[in-house]
Amino acid sequence: MVGEKNIQVSNPYPKRIFNILVLAGISFFLVKSLISGFRDLQNYQFQIDIGRLGVSTLAFTTMCLFQAATGVFIIRSMGQSVDFPNGIRNLLFSLMGKYIPGKIWVIIFRMQYISDENISKENIFSATVIEHFFLIGTAMIYGSTVMLFYNFHPIFLFVLIFSMVGTLFLVLNPSFIFKCINKLLIMFKRNELSSDTKVGTPFLILLLTSVTWSIFSIATWFAATSLVDINISYFFRIASAHALSVIGGFLVFFSPGGIGVREGIFVAVNPAESMAISVLLALLLRIIITVSEIIAFFLAHTFLIISRRENDKWTKL
């Protein structure tokens, strides 16, 4: 018809085919690694230690709650008023968005549910960016440092230097983050944010994210030793490899929850020095983390409901 514009819609199939081929290739690598190292499994003493599985699940659940609390702290440090119980619950719920292809859903979920607390979406978006800047930076420093200690490789050296310089720059010059965020906000026709922040806030965020990865490492070790008897000397190697694989899975946008990518990176690093063992550990860690995220959300949700009921009782009195 006259006056109608021809709207060109991009064909989604090439992208979907590419994503499927990549995930299929990673799956083939994992299966091949498991089969090729099947004989090595006979050299290990397997076990199903329910106690260690429980400790690992508890530690991962604690890590999820602590990470969510850190996210709420960042929002509050920007001058926004949000109570911790409700904020933690909403942030944990937003984690489920990572299991939808395209990690943007994590941000969308946060902007939707936390904005109900009269907090601007610009501040929520900025807090999310700051949180993940520090989470990714500290994980890359931690993981690459340990990997270099065990096996020197130029890639790990590059990652270490890049992450250390980048994280240090952000800590000493936090206004740079806001400049980048404001450019994105301008692109989407949103209001700019003030870059005012307390001097010690970036250092405190760095400390909190470091604690998060420390809890993560302990949880990873208990999960690994619940399946197979591994020497304590492998603690940092397995934990740091898991941290790098989680960050790698997060950065790959087409994979929901980093499924396949996270396991592929973990097995490629091969922290257990046995491809088959690394495959089994990667799968076990995937299951435990997913279960822990769900438990953390329901704990936060239950606590919020109980606290609101108690407040209502006191209000009626």
Image (cartoon, rainbow, N blue to C red):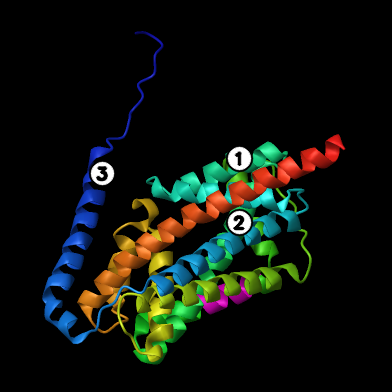
Span of residues in magenta: 162-170
Looking at numbered disc 3 in the image, what kind of residue is underneath it? Arg
State the separation of the CA atoms marked 3 and 2.
30 Å
Q: Can you identify the residue that label 2 sits on?
A: 180
Q: Is residue 183 above or below residue 138?
A: above
Res 268 label:
none
Tell us which disc is closer to us: 3 or 1. 1
The residue lying at 64 percent from left, 59 percent from top is 69
Location of residue 113 in the rendering, given as x and y in whole percent from the top left corner: 60, 40
- Graded by Cα atoms within 10 Å as few (under 14), some (14 to 19) or many (20 or more), the crowding at tag 1 reads some
Query: Along the line of sight, which residue is nearer the eye, 34 or 186?
Result: 34
State the separation of the CA atoms marked 1 and 2.
24 Å
Secondary element type, mark 2: helix
The quadrant in which residue 77 appears is bottom right
The residue lying at 78 percent from left, 38 percent from top is 312
Query: Along the line of sight, which residue is nearer the eye, 209 or 197?
Result: 209
Q: Can you identify the residue that label 3 sits on?
A: 16
Secondary element type, mark 1: helix
Looking at numbered disc 2 in the image, what kind of residue is underneath it? Cys
